[in-house]
Image: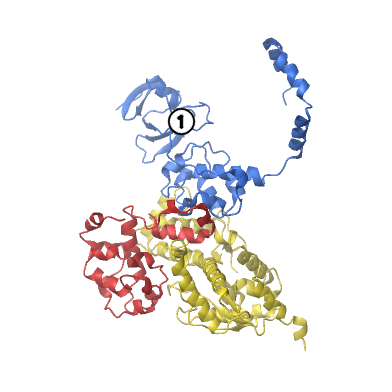
Amino acid sequence: MPSATKLEQFVGFRERVEMLSGENVFACYQCGMCTAGCSFADEMDVLPHQVIRQLQLNNWKVLECNAKWICASCLNCQTRCPKGVDLSKLMEAMRQIYLRQQMDNLELNKYSIDQIRCLPQIALVASFRKKTG
Amino acid sequence: MNNAAYFPGCSLKAEAGDYERSAAAVMEVLGQPLEELERWTCCGTVYSLTDDDLMHQLASVRNLIRAQECGADEIVTLCSMCFNTLKRSKVFIEQDSARLETVNAFMDEEQDYEGGVEVFHLLEILRDQVGFESIEGKVTRPLSGLRVAPYYGCTLLRPREIGIDEPDTPTILQDFIRALWATPVEFAFQAECCGTYQIVDSPEMVLEKSHRILNSAMRAGADVLVTSCPLCMHNLRLCYEELRSSLPEKRELSIIYLTQLAAIAFEVETGELPTSMAKLVEGLPTSMELVP
Amino acid sequence: MNTSSENTIRIYVMGSAYEVPRGLTIMSAMEHAGWRFTRGAGCRSGFCGACSTVYRQEGDYRLRFVLACQTEAEDGMYLVQLPFTPAPRVSYTLAELNPDENVLLQHYPEIARCVSCNTCTKACPQDIEVMDYIQAALRGDIAQTASLSFDCIQCGLCSMRCPADIKHYHMAQMARRIYGRYMSPVTAHLEERIAEIEKGVYEEEVEALVKMTRSELEEIYAARVVE
């Protein structure tokens, strides 16, 4: 599991996420359209609009949410945001903070040959890109 | 088509072979045969969303260089994910000359990418270059009475800047279906996510998302669902297999690639069709019966 | 600083400078400098892949990758040997494999992490298009993978450099084995010859050879017909 100490090193956490994503989290006025349209919100421990709120508050603990791994960049939120915030990029920035510190979300070693036989390469390539660094 | 190179992507050479076979046959009929790009590499399937991560743009740019090398000014894809990744990478890299320079300097074994190679999805070619009227003209077996659900998924439509149609109210697939004399059946979840690559480590979640899509299409009365994405196809078919045992005997949904639908209407190579689809095709009137 | 004379050059091994004669291979130059290879040297002919060497030339920003037995030492080389690559090989029974299009991916799933950076190709001392065969493997083209990787000598430099932690050379070896077992065309004359051997057609001849003295053997060897 990712170590909190590694993550706590992020003093300028919000700035780091904004730099990686190129997004301005203060553009968000918390209307909740992103959460309303999210196909995966029911699986998330922190809802999409709440993720942005915590980013605004510079609360690095939001990094630990499962939402960033569940978000599949379907971009419903991005298309519908009245303020033009691209939440998928914020989620990716949070994933990247993990992946760049060798904290993967997918344990490739635990997959057996038979399990991989049932998976198409398009899914493997995608999930390795999003969940391993 | 202008000087276009066809980018297959990995799936089209493996699980989605039927998609490629039917598309090749259909484009042959339309007089614009697909010519495969040489030495293409996997596009990466998902676009990298961080601003500083040029490493994950390399695969796309390398493919754009391959197109440039053979004098092609367009890349045409069948797979929605390849389309999305290649096109977004192209836009990202061409937006900022510093990015382009860095990538070109890194790939010093290749010629520099000059920019300007366009990326299209086959549907755009069919709409904008071939024209749906011409498609209608090539139909020898009209799909009259066939109720077809247009399933867009995510990557054909979003983000808006690169999508092939209006993200919330797309019509391109419906128009395509109509051109084949079939009846488009719109449904609530036609542009919702199937669960995508989460099939690798959260299959239950994917089955649930796919289930909603299939239910929504069947409740709207569809007999057939068409898609352009090999990963959607994988997930939806997997879900359908699980679902089928609980369905009433005669209630079936055939999930096929959009070019397979056209191949049926053109009476050319369709690739393998689900048994339920083969049954539907048998029930269709032939062109002879339609002649007054 | 003038590091070379007419007859000598200066090389650096593990950070220490050595004056060695001009015109030697890297391997001979190192031995001349007093290094003894207990690992990292094998056939000395460019076939075994044991002497993979990484170096940087003074004033060059790039790392270069060569075989120590095949490359002439040059003035100003900073050298390091990589006699071993910690790249696990997957075990499988060739005869029991199902050679479907996904078979390489099943055994080496990390090939799906390839980002097409081409670093492997740049590291290959055999000039193999390594990235291209990884890409072929990813799309299930076993024949292409086998063909492109044919000159691989398993030195492991590709895998040492790969940012995606792919074990290229083991995967490629598997592809060639699958190709050989399931896909290569059957040669009729080989089948015929095996049948002849099994029938015992050559036994008399072999027995005669076994009975010969060394000088008789040398005589017929020298008089053999070379194709």
Label 1 sits on residue? C51
Residue closer to the observer: B225 or B120? B225
Q: Is residue A100 above or below residue A62?
A: above
Q: Secondary structure at mark 1?
A: loop
Q: Nearer the viewer, residue B72 or C209?
A: C209
Residue at 31% x, 55% y: name it: A1
Q: Is residue B153 visible?
A: no
**Type of the residue with mark 1:** Cys
Residue at point 61%, 50% (across, down): C99
Q: Residue at x 42, y 24 (%)?
A: C38
Q: Colour of chain B?
A: yellow
From the viewer's perspective, is residue B160 above or below residue C219?
Answer: below
Name the one closer to the observer, C135 or A9: A9
Dividing the picture into quadrants, the one containing residue B9 is: bottom right
Q: Position of residue C218 (x, y in %)?
A: 68, 13
Q: Quadrant of the N terminus of chain C?
A: top left
In the rendered view of the protein, which quadrant contains the C terminus of chain C?
top right
- Chain A appears in which tint? red
Residue at the spot 45% in from the left edge and 68% down from the top edge: B204
Residue C98 in the image: above or below residue C194 = below
Chain ID for blue: C
Residue C197 appears in the rendering? yes
Q: Is residue B87 left or right of residue C150?
A: left
Residue A59, horizontal then vertical, whole percent: 22, 66
